[in-house]
Image (cartoon, rainbow, N blue to C red):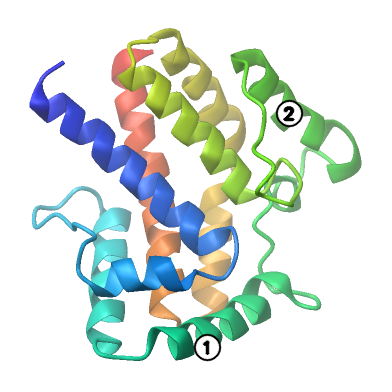
């Protein structure tokens, strides 16, 4: 595998990890310190509209909070995260079955997500105390697939094709639209746009491989 190919895998995983860090719970102080240090690489060239917009929000967030106390920033973001994603009665629920009209949560919807995991031989990690259709769990599965692809397990491109078509691509755009509607927090907007752009980018990659 060439260095360029390895760099693409690294970039894919970095984008997935960013979205997981922002959405699975309020961003940690460690994550915020890393982000404000400027260690997150954002490409200068255009990738796609969503990713480009997400990177702009990242840069805006970093510029706005340069020199801020990370502990205080973490506290403020936890409050905002709770208002948007936790509630009570949160305006945005980052669960696939919340957005899909063709399934019910207590029934085939969750079972279909879990069946996709099982078919690939993956078990959701215990550190995400949410249902298996939660965005962080679905992204953890995507990360596992990309890692296996980097190891040369080409059959995982097929599993990703099915997962994108039947799951992530059915609901992510609607969730991103809700985030835009409900918050002006640059970090959440960054993660939303990067999530949409990531799914679009993965769709293009898998279309070439599966």
Looking at the image, which residue is at 59% across and 58% down?
24
Looking at the image, which residue is at 24% across and 60% down?
40
Q: Nearer the viewer, residue 114 or 122?
A: 122
Q: How many marks?
A: 2
Looking at the image, which residue is at 41% across and 68% down?
30
- Residue named by callout 1: 76
Q: Residues within 10 Å of mark 1 (few under 14, many from 20)?
A: few
Instruction: Please provide percent x and percent y for residue 204.
Output: 31, 30
| Badge nearest the viewer, 2 or 1 | 1
Answer yes or no: is residue 110 visible: yes
- Residue named by callout 2: 114
Answer yes or no: is residue 57 visible: no
For the C terminus, give its image quadrant: top left
Mark 2–mark 1 Cα distance, whole angstroms, equals 34 Å
Instruction: Mark 2 or mark 1: name the one nearer the start of the chain.
Output: 1
Badge 2 element:
helix
Q: Quadrant of residue 152?
A: top left
Q: Nearer the viewer, residue 199 or 155?
A: 155
Q: Residues within 10 Å of mark 2 (few under 14, many from 20)?
A: some
Q: Quadrant of residue 125?
A: top right
In the displayed structure image, the side of residue 52 where residue 199 appears, left or right = right
């Amino acid at each position: 595998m060439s260095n360029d190919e390895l760099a693409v895998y690294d970039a894919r995983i970095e984008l997935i990890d960013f979205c997981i860090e922002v959405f699975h719970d309020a961003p940690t102080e460690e994550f915020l310190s890393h982000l404000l240090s400027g260690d997150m690489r954002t490409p200068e060239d255009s990738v796609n509209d969503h990713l480009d917009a997400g990177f702009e929000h990242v840069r805006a967030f970093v510029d706005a909070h340069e020199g801020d106390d990370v502990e205080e920033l973490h506290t403020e973001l936890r409050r905002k995260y709770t208002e948007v994603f936790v509630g009570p009665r949160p305006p945005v629920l980052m669960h696939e079955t919340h957005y899909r009209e063709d399934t019910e949560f207590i029934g085939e919807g969750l079972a279909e997500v879990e069946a996709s995991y099982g078919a690939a031989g993956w078990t959701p990690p215990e550190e995400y105390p949410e249902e298996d259709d939660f965005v962080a769990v679905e992204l953890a599965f995507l990360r596992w697939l990309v890692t296996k692809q980097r190891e040369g397990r080409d059959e995982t491109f097929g599993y990703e094709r099915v997962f994108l078509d039947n799951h992530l691509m059915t609901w992510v755009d609607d969730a991103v639209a809700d985030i835009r509607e409900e918050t002006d927090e640059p970090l959440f907007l960054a993660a939303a746009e990067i999530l949409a752009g990531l799914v679009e980018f993965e769709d293009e990659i898998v279309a070439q491989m599966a």
